[in-house]
Image: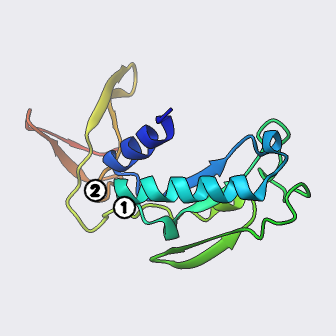
């Protein structure tokens, strides 16, 4: 129905660099190795067109309903030798979806760049004061630093 293609394109467009393809409902195919390989071939073809390198993607056969290959290795697919992927950090391999998730490289935070903290909200808390809230996108923030909020030009000291 094209939903997987849409999700892959959307993920790539939004800057998702790493991908795991969990091939679900393998129990409904009686854990067919041929069907698994067919899905890998089809999926690899279109994720490559989107911009992903299939060599960097872990393909994992699972059954979410039964929990097969989610956390523990499933005895229902003795033909499955596991997934292997290549990244800048090197090669990694495993058998389960959990191992594939654990093999995702955490994104690097550009701490060497100037501080950029887009504000998400501002709370006024009695006895404490005004508390701006946001996520640090680049740089570092520490207690005692003096920061200036743009475009208002308000300068304040970071308390915690």
Numbered disc 1: secondary structure: loop
Marks 2 and 1 in Cβ contact (< 8 Å): yes
**Residue drawn at 70 percent across, 52 percent down:** 35
Label number found at residue 138: 2
- Left or right relative to 19: residue 36: right
- Indicate left or right for 133 with 3 as reference: left
What colouring does the structure picture have? rainbow
Tell me which residue sits at (37%, 41%) in the image.
Answer: 10
Q: Position of residue 142 (x, y in %)?
A: 35, 55
Q: Spatial distance from mark 2 to mark 1, Cα to Cα?
A: 7 Å
Query: In terms of sequence position, does the residue under pointer 2 or pointer 1 come before the other?
Result: 1
Q: Residue at x 43, y 66 (%)?
A: 53
* Quadrant of the rendered image containing residue 100: bottom right
- Quarter of the image where the C terminus is located: top left
For label 1, the crowd category at 10 Å Cα-Cα, with few meaning under 14, some 14 to 19 and many 20 or more, is few
Image spot of residue 4 (x, y percent) = 50, 40
Please identify the quarter of the rendering in which residue 49 is found.
Answer: bottom left
Question: Which residue is disc 1 drawn over?
Answer: 109
- Which percent across, then down, holds residue 30? 85, 46
Q: Please tell me how crowded label 2 is: few (under 14), some (14-19), or many (20+) other residues with Cα within 10 Å.
A: some
Q: Is residue 160 visible?
A: no
**Vertical position of residue 71 compared to residue 129: above or below:** below
Residue pictured at 40% horizontal, 64% vertical? 108
User: Is there any visible trace of residue 31 in the rendered image?
Assistant: yes
How many numbered marks have been drawn onto this rendered protein structure?
Answer: 2
Drawn side of residue 28 relative to residue 156, left or right: right
Nearest the viewer among 17 and 102 is: 17
- Where residue 109 appears, as percent x and y from the top left, is 36, 61
* Nearer-the-camera pick, 140 or 21: 21
Which structural element holds mark 2?
A: loop
């Amino acid at each position: 129905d094209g939903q997987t293609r849409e999700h892959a394109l959307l993920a790539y467009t939004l800057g998702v660099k790493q991908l795991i393809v969990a091939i679900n409902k393998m129990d409904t195919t009686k854990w067919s190795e041929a069907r698994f390989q067919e899905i890998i071939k089809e999926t690899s073809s279109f994720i490559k067109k989107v911009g992903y390198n299939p060599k960097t993607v872990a393909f994992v056969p699972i059954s979410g309903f039964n929990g097969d290959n989610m956390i523990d290795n499933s005895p229902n697919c003795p033909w499955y030798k596991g997934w292997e992927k290549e990244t800048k950090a090197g090669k990694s391999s495993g058998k389960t979806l959990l191992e594939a998730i654990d093999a995702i490289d955490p994104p690097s935070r550009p701490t060497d760049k100037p501080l950029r903290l887009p504000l998400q909200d501002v709370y006024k808390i009695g006895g404490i004061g005004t508390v701006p809230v946001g996520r640090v996108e680049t740089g570092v923030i520490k207690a005692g630093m003096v920061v200036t909020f743009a475009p208002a030009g308000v300068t304040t000291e970071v308390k915690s």
